[in-house]
């Protein structure tokens, strides 16, 4: 039995050895076949082998480069985000173009808006606390619903845009603000990367509400409007606190494409996007279903469309008044003088600096004057000159302390902004209207004329060359009799002032009075002569503004004030830049002289032979003096009541003979005075004017 078991064990062992040997043999055969196959295989081309090596090296290098660049970009972004402030919102806010506003004061002394001035960008900055919540959420829900949770970049949207191979879109409100501030709009990945890094940095340094405030004040909303405040006023005629939910959504709807969604031109498309904005607000839980439905059904009422808020307006443009033109000119000139700005800098500040300008305009008087001149009300019959033009005219109305109450620089409808203003920049010969300034007032002031009853010989003088000069208006050389100064003034004789100037006053004294005391600054050295000073045949000229200012001295006790069209100019932060609330003046003549001249010039309106007879305002003392130049080219009248002093010029733009008499210009004055004195008390006197002046 034992033998049998031993035999079985030996047989099993042999089988195992056989199997092992067989496996070894199989492996050897496979190895042999593999070696044989390898030996029979054609060797690799050396060039291919080298190319494969190069390709493998390039792939490896690219991989390493991407890794290095990626790491460096990551480090740069992190460093930039946490580094120094890249964009200073406070600085940008102070540098942003902002609309300037001109104000006037009504009869109750309340400040009212007159007009707005802006360059290419119509913007008024509004503080975040004054922006309604509905308006904020309308923009956030529509433009960037994760605004309050992301760090300046919505990575989900950014990656989505990158995958779609689109370099546009995916911008957050923060990124859009960066674009608005930097004005970088090119469609490139480089710009996008820069925008992203700046957005991250901005969010690291500012609160979300500060960023949203800046965005809502810089976003373009069509029709020339930058920022929500000007857009609300333009489209709805409302301040921000008056906006409805529907109006807030409509403003936000414009943002994506200000032309496509402009409610003036594409209300249907704007309404569709407005409803989408409301859907977004509902989805984000910022409004209720009831509020949503009510806003969707709300009919939007737009404000009247004007030339200033219409991108494609073909209607007739309404231009700003001559008064506003002059305010702009005066403010620019004063800024250049006070702060040493050049003209370009001054213009930029006036139109884009967010100034608040308090004008001295009396809007009621200005509107009446514009109506008279635009429609030529009260103007005499006239014929056109050889250029086909009717006589033109200009008028300045002032009070007795330098305030320019109203002015108009031409007749008919105004044809542009800051066009030729004949009231302030057209200098024409004054004719006889210069006599009270150049002869009579100085002679009274010097004691040569005691009163209106002082007599002077009505006879021409003989010049050194033997010529008899001058003639009176009727063509005579004088009556040869003594006449009173009062008579000479209201009849506008030429012989009497020529004789006073030549024999008593002296040319040097006369010239000093008109140029220094009465401040007729545009007379030239060649006007220091008999003809210019005695009868107004000047080489340099005068404007209605200068003449009104000079003639005010006869009603205020002898003072000539520096004229002004504005009280104060404030910058966007409320700092006073310019101040005219205490105007300067020159005591041009004695108060007693002014009183005598007032009585003498009153006779021109009350005496039946006076050249301004019939021009007196009923119930009010009215003084006046007319003037007509040689060849009848220019006509003037300067007149005053206890309320206003007025100077009017009438003539052709290209000097040409005016037919008729001084009646021509008297009709204009009567029309102006009758309208601007309507409703005013007749108890006011020139003594009242002088007593008011004693305050300073």
Image (cartoon, grey):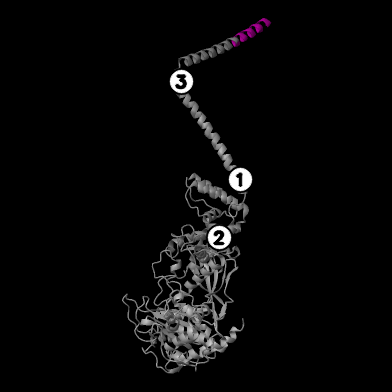
Q: Is residue 449 located in the magenta-colored stretch of the structure?
A: no
**Circle on res. 408:** none
Residue of label 2: 95
| Viewer-closest of 614 and 54 | 614
> In the drawing, does residue 688 fall left or right of residue 415?
right
Majority SS type along the magenta span? helix
**Circle on res. 78:** 1
Residue 480 locus on image (x, y percent): 41, 93
- State which mark lies toward you, 2 or 1: 2
Indicate which disc, 2 or 3, sits on the residue closer to the N terminus: 3
Indicate which disc, 3 or 1, sits on the residue closer to the N terminus: 3
Residue 460 locus on image (x, y percent): 41, 88
| Viewer-closest of 671 and 688 | 688
As measured in the structure, the alpha-carbon distance from the residue carrying label 2 to the one carrying label 1 is 29 Å
**Circle on res. 44:** 3
* Badge 3 density bin: few <14, some 14–19, many ≥20, Cα 10 Å: few
Tag 2 and tag 1, C-beta contact below 8 Å: no
Which quadrant is the N terminus positioned in? top right
- State which mark lies toward you, 3 or 1: 1
Residue 222 locus on image (x, y percent): 47, 62
In the image, residue 619 sits, relative to residue 30, either above or below, namely: below
Disc 2 element: helix
- State which mark lies toward you, 2 or 3: 2
Which quadrant is the C terminus positioned in? bottom right
């Amino acid at each position: 039995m034992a033998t049998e078991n031993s035999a079985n064990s030996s047989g099993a062992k042999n089988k195992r050895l056989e199997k092992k040997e067989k496996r070894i043999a199989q492996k050897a055969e496979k190895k042999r076949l593999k070696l044989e196959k390898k030996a029979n295989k054609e060797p690799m081309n050396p060039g291919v082998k080298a190319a494969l090596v190069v390709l493998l090296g390039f792939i490896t290098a690219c991989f390493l480069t991407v890794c290095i660049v990626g790491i460096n970009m990551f480090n740069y972004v992190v460093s930039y985000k946490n580094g120094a402030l890249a964009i200073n919102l406070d600085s940008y806010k102070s540098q942003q173009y902002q609309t300037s506003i001109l104000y006037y004061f009504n009869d109750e002394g309340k400040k009212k808006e007159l007009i707005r001035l802006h360059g290419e960008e119509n913007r008024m900055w509004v503080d975040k606390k004054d922006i309604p919540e509905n308006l904020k959420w309308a923009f956030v829900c529509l433009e960037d619903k994760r605004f309050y949770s992301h760090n300046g970049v919505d990575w989900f949207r950014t990656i989505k845009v990158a995958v779609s191979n689109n370099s546009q879109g995916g911008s957050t409100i923060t990124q859009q603000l960066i674009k608005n501030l930097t004005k970088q709009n090119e469609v490139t990945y480089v710009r996008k990367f820069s925008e992203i890094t700046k957005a991250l940095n901005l969010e690291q340094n500012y609160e979300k509400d500060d960023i949203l405030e800046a965005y809502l004040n810089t976003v373009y909303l069509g029709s020339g409007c930058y920022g929500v405040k000007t857009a609300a006023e333009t489209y709805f005629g409302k301040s921000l606190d008056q906006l409805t939910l529907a109006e807030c959504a409509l403003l936000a709807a414009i943002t994506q494409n200000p032309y496509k969604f402009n409610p003036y031109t594409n209300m249907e498309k704007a309404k569709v996007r407005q409803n989408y904005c409301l859907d977004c607000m509902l989805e984000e839980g910022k409004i209720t279903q009831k509020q949503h439905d009510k806003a969707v059904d709300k009919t939007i009422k737009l404000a009247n469309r004007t030339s200033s808020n219409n991108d494609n307006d073909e209607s007739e443009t309404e231009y700003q008044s001559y008064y506003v033109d002059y305010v702009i000119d005066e403010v620019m000139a004063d800024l250049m003088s006070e702060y040493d700005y050049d003209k370009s800098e001054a213009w930029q500040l006036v139109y884009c600096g967010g100034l608040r300008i308090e004008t001295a305009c009396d809007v009621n008087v200005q509107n009446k004057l514009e109506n008279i001149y635009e429609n030529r009300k009260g103007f005499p019959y006239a014929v056109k000159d050889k250029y086909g033009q009717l006589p033109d005219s200009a008028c300045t109305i002032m009070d007795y302390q330098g305030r320019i109450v109203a002015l108009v620089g031409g007749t008919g409808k105004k044809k542009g902004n800051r066009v030729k203003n004949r009231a302030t920049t057209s200098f024409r010969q004054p004719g006889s209207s210069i006599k009270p300034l150049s002869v009579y007032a100085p002679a009274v002031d010097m004691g040569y004329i005691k009163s209106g009853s002082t007599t002077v010989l009505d006879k021409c003088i003989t010049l050194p060359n033997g010529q008899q000069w001058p003639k009176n208006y009727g063509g005579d050389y004088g009556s040869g009799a003594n006449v009173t100064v009062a008579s000479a003034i209201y009849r506008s004789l030429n012989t009497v002032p020529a004789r006073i100037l030549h024999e008593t006053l002296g040319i040097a004294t006369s010239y000093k009075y008109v140029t220094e005391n009465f401040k007729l600054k545009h007379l030239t050295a060649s006007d220091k002569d008999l003809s210019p000073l005695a009868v107004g045949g000047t080489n340099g000229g005068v404007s209605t503004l200068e003449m009104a200012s000079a003639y005010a001295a006869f009603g205020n006790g002898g003072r000539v004030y520096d004229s002004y069209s504005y009280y104060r100019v404030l910058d966007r932060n409320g700092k006073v830049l310019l101040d005219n609330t205490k105007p300067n003046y020159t005591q041009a003549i004695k108060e007693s002289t002014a009183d005598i001249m007032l009585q003498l010039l009153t006779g021109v309106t009350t005496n039946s032979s006076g050249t301004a007879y019939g021009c007196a305002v009923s119930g009010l003392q009215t003084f006046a003096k007319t003037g007509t130049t040689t060849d009848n080219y220019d006509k003037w009248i300067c007149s005053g009541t206890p309320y206003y002093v007025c100077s009017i010029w009438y003539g052709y733009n290209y000097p040409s003979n005016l037919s008729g008499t001084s009646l021509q210009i008297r009709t204009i004055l009567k029309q102006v005075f009758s309208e601007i004195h309507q409703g005013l008390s007749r108890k006011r006197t020139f003594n009242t004017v002088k007593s008011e002046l004693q305050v300073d």
